[in-house]
């Protein structure tokens, strides 16, 4: 029979990788707690319309990357390709916004049907924040600072923040008209996909990965030049806040983000360590989205970090530091029926008391079991043979013996617990 394999682009995370993931996730949690963000978890599966309306039909994500299918009730369902639309839907569905502005964070798998390559998968993970009901330019800077500080605390080097303003819908409409006219005159010089986008999503052409198209675009009009005075002032206020926070940034007038609901601030954080898939965090303001999904007009800003890329960045340094320990406190060795049963019971008691316990279940010779005890790095071995089982005692072996501590002691189970849990003798 053929071996069963995971689907292309769907990646297993193996036990040896998990300490690093847990370290990254724990740091993110801690960062969010300090920033007053609360966690929200939403379903992986949503009605397709949520993303069609919340992301936009003309985007890559909705146009060609979604996992969409009919469920048994013939509803069109989609595996979430990103977190924002779901978080906004949940906030509206449960009336969170009537309780005031919400600072939320989420993490979990996202699904996009893309061509898999390093740092690009079909199931990948994001951690992200959504600050709903915040319009002040300081909230843009605060959100960016949370991402920046998380990446810095994780020790990611070569960070660069790229910043742009997309203005408000009026600014964008004016720009769109100017850009479309400009592009129409150069239609023949663009790649096929970009030509198609002139009518569907012309701003996204600026983001094209085609080198020839990019060369043509070098002379294109810039959105930043179409901003109204109010939008320009708002952008300057955000920039002053970033300067006060001493977060360096580069203006990138071509940064448009793939999603239609963004307004004003758009940003990406890249790391020079990542190569082609250089963007680790993308985000911005989406003042239009909540209304588009049926809520009252509400200002909002958020971002998402790709966890695979983040873990890759951390793996390049000495990363396991701070990871949860995996070496047991006690290794339990036993042989003979009654002894083996007692060892099972004792292991459970030790675990209930908070100890990390590895119970040897092989039934092999004592010498072999003890060799494994030594190899696993545990400081203590508990040994129960037939004699110990009969007398109701255990043998505690010190595997990290210093000259003045005894090598082994015969103890009753209560004494053992006191010995292992109590203050060192
Ligand atoms: P890209 O231009 O790399 O496709 P994007 O604009 O589609 O990125 P966003 O939708 O802003 O990305 O998602 C935010 C972050 O999620 C990205 O910066 C990246 O780190 C991560 N990400 C997006 N798509 C994938 C994927 N297919 N595999 C792994 N990580 C991803
Ligand atoms: Mg993408």
Image (tube, helix red, strand yellow):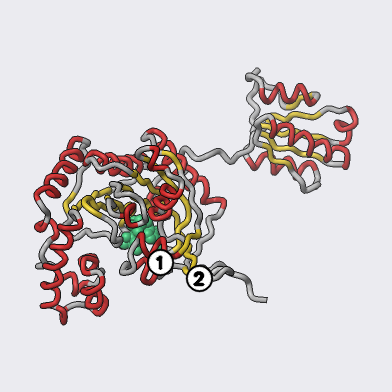
User: Quadrant location of residue 206?
Assistant: bottom left
Which label sits in the foreground, 1 or 2?
2
Q: Which quadrant would residue 63 be assigned to in this image? A: bottom left
Q: Is residue 207 visible?
A: yes
**Residue 345's mark?**
none
| Residue 45 position within the rendered picture, expressed as x and y whole percent measured from the top left | 50, 60
Residue occupying the point 74% across, 29% down: 396
**Residue 43 position within the rendered picture, expressed as x and y whole percent measured from the top left:** 51, 54
Q: What distance separates the C-alpha of mark 1 from that of mark 2?
A: 25 Å
Residue bearing the label numbered 1: 117
Q: Quick check: 186 left or right of 154?
A: left
In this picture, residue 283 sits left or right of residue 356: left
Work out whether residue 120 can be spotted. Answer: no
Task: Tell me which numbered mark, 1 or 2, is placed earlier along the sequence.
Answer: 2
For the N terminus, the quadrant is bottom right
Q: Going by the image, does 99 lie left or right of 221?
A: right
Who is closer to the viewer here, 403 or 340?
340
Q: Residue at x 59, y 69 (%)?
A: 72
The dot on residue 69 is: 2
**Residue that extends furthest to the bottom in the rendered view of this protein:** 188
Q: Residues within 10 Å of mark 1 (few under 14, many from 20)?
A: few
* Residue 148 x, y percent position in the rendering: 30, 43
Q: Are marks 1 and 2 in contact (CB under 8 Å)?
A: no
Q: Nearer the viewer, residue 276 or 144?
A: 144
């Amino acid at each position: 029979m053929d071996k069963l394999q995971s689907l292309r682009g769907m990646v297993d995370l193996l036990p040896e990788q998990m300490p690093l993931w847990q370290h990254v996730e724990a740091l993110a949690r801690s960062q969010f707690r300090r920033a007053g963000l609360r966690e929200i978890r939403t379903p992986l599966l949503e009605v397709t319309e949520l993303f069609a309306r919340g992301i936009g039909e003309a985007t890559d994500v909705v146009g060609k990357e979604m996992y969409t299918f009919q469920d048994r009730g013939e509803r069109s369902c989609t595996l979430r390709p990103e977190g924002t639309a779901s978080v906004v839907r949940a906030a509206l569905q449960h009336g969170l916004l009537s309780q005031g502005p919400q600072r939320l964070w989420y993490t979990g798998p996202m699904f996009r049907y893309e061509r898999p390559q390093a740092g690009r998968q079909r199931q990948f993970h994001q951690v992200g924040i959504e600050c709903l009901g915040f319009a002040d330019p300081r909230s843009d800077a605060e959100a960016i600072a949370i991402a920046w500080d998380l990446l810095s605390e994780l020790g990611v080097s070569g960070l660069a923040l790229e910043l742009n303003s997309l203005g408000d819908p009026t600014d964008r409409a004016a720009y769109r008209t100017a850009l479309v006219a400009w592009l129409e005159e150069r239609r023949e010089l663009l790649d096929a996909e970009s030509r198609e986008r002139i009518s569907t999503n012309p701003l996204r052409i600026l983001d094209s990965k085609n080198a020839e198209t990019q060369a043509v675009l070098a002379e294109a009009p810039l959105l930043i030049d179409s901003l109204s005075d109010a939008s320009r002032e708002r952008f300057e206020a955000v920039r002053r806040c970033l300067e006060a926070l001493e977060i360096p940034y580069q203006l990138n007038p071509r940064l448009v983000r793939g999603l239609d609901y963004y307004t004003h601030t758009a940003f990406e954080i890249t790391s020079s360590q990542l190569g082609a898939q250089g963007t680790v965090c993308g985000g911005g303001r989406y003042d239009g989205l909540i209304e588009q999904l049926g809520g009252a007009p509400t200002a909002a800003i958020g971002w998402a970090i790709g966890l695979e890329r983040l873990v890759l960045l951390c793996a390049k340094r000495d990363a396991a530091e701070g990871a949860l320990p995996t070496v047991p406190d006690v290794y339990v060795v036993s042989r003979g029926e009654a002894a083996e049963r007692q060892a099972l019971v004792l292991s459970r008691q030790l675990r209930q008391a908070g100890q990390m316990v590895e119970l040897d279940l092989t039934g092999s010779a004592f010498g072999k079991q003890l060799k494994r005890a030594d190899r696993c790095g545990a400081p203590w071995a508990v040994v129960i043979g037939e004699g110990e089982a009969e007398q109701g005692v255990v043998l505690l072996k010190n595997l990290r013996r210093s000259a003045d501590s005894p090598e082994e002691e015969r103890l009753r189970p209560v004494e053992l617990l006191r010995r292992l849990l109590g203050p060192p003798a």
